[in-house]
Amino acid sequence: MNKADLTEALAERANIPKVRAANYINILTEAIREALTNGDKVTISDFGTFTISRRRSFKGRNPKNREEINVPERRIPVFRAGKGLKEALNVDDVVAE
């Protein structure tokens, strides 16, 4: 599912125009981006938590010429699934026999 698919699903479920659904999705993703940029974590109950982690610097190699390069420290986003999402993903499908 991509952003367009998500927009369409939200528009159908909320019975709103796709333009408004796209705007809501943009507002949500921008709010999450701003919070993470400010160093805050974002927790959505029963869904999960977005946080920032630091990836330390390391020496790497350019695959084209094997030249050694220094890869700087980076901040990366991390998502940890919440209990509700984990449970929803692991519900056994009961097959009627």
Image (spheres, rainbow, N blue to C red):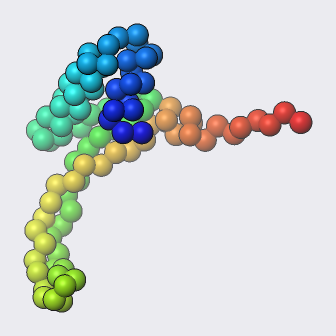
Q: Observer-nearest residue: 81 or 3?
A: 3
Using the image, determine if residue 44 lies above or below residue 18: below
Regarding residue 5, the answer to whether it shows in the image is: yes
Q: Residue placed farthest to the bottom in the image?
A: 66
How many numbered marks does the figure carry? 0
Question: In this image, 18 relative to 83: left or right?
Answer: left
Using the image, determine if residue 14 lies above or below residue 59: above
In which quadrant will I find the N terminus? Answer: top left
Question: In this image, 61 relative to 47: left or right?
Answer: left
**x, y percent for residue 68:** 13, 86
Tell me which residue sits at (39%, 21%) in the image: 10
Q: Observer-nearest residue: 17 or 73?
A: 17
Q: Residue placed farthest to the right in the image?
A: 97
**x, y percent for residue 53:** 23, 53
Using the image, determine if residue 20 lies above or below residue 85: above
Tell me which residue sits at (45%, 16%) in the image: 13
Tell me which residue sits at (19%, 58%) in the image: 54
Image-quadrant location for residue 26: top left
Question: In this image, 94 relative to 89: left or right?
Answer: right
Regarding residue 24, the answer to whether it shows in the image is: no
Image-quadrant location for residue 63: bottom left
Image-quadrant location for residue 27: top left
Q: Observer-nearest residue: 29 or 77?
A: 29
**x, y percent for residue 93:** 71, 37
Tell me which residue sits at (14%, 34%) in the image: 34
**x, y percent for residue 97:** 89, 36
